[in-house]
Image: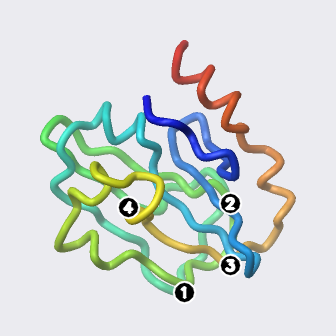
Amino acid sequence: MKDIPENYKFLSSHEWAKLEEDGKVTVGISDYAQDQLGDIVFVELPEIDSEVNQGDEAAVVESVKAASEVYSPVSGKVIDVNSSLEDSPETVNLSAFEEGWFFKIEVTDISELENLLSPEQYSEHCQD
């Protein structure tokens, strides 16, 4: 497994959340998740301005192996989506923690990040 960025938090279902300097949260799936899924062929992103709750399904990713729901690690309003994934879903395989992000959220309760796994906890979770 590639190095897990220190400033990211995780759901046990392999989604990551990165708190940006502007207070928004960027969301994607982990490198471990993309590796388990295999070649990603389709990404369905949420609608901009849609409301999401922590733990709710917000997107879908399909690979040659399976389709998988992507859950929101925090609650809030979707303010941006990575529309380049619609034409180039393989970006998630190539750069899960950077260019392969899925959507950005204007968070309603920043303390929800405290409920997520730290990089160390997530790494241990992936080894179970």
Dot 2 falls on a residue whose secondary structure is loop
**Residue type, mark 1 in image:** Asp
Between residues 127 and 94, which one lies in front from this camera angle? 94
Q: Nearer the viewer, mark 3 or mark 1?
A: 3
Q: Which residue is mark 3?
A: 106
Between residues 36 and 112, which one lies in front from this camera angle? 36
Q: Which residue is mark 4?
A: 100
Give percent across and percent down for residue 32: 42, 34
Q: Is residue 7 above or below residue 34?
A: below
Dot 1 falls on a residue whose secondary structure is loop
Residue 49 is tagged as 1
Give percent across and percent down for residue 84: 28, 76
Distance, label 3 to label 2, CA atoms, is 9 Å
Q: Residue furthest right?
A: 111
Which residue is located at x 68 percent, y 60 percent?
Answer: 74
Q: For residue 105, what is the image quadrant? A: bottom right
The colour mode here is: rainbow
Which of marks 1 and 3 precedes in the sequence?
1
Q: For residue 36, what is the image quadrant? A: top left
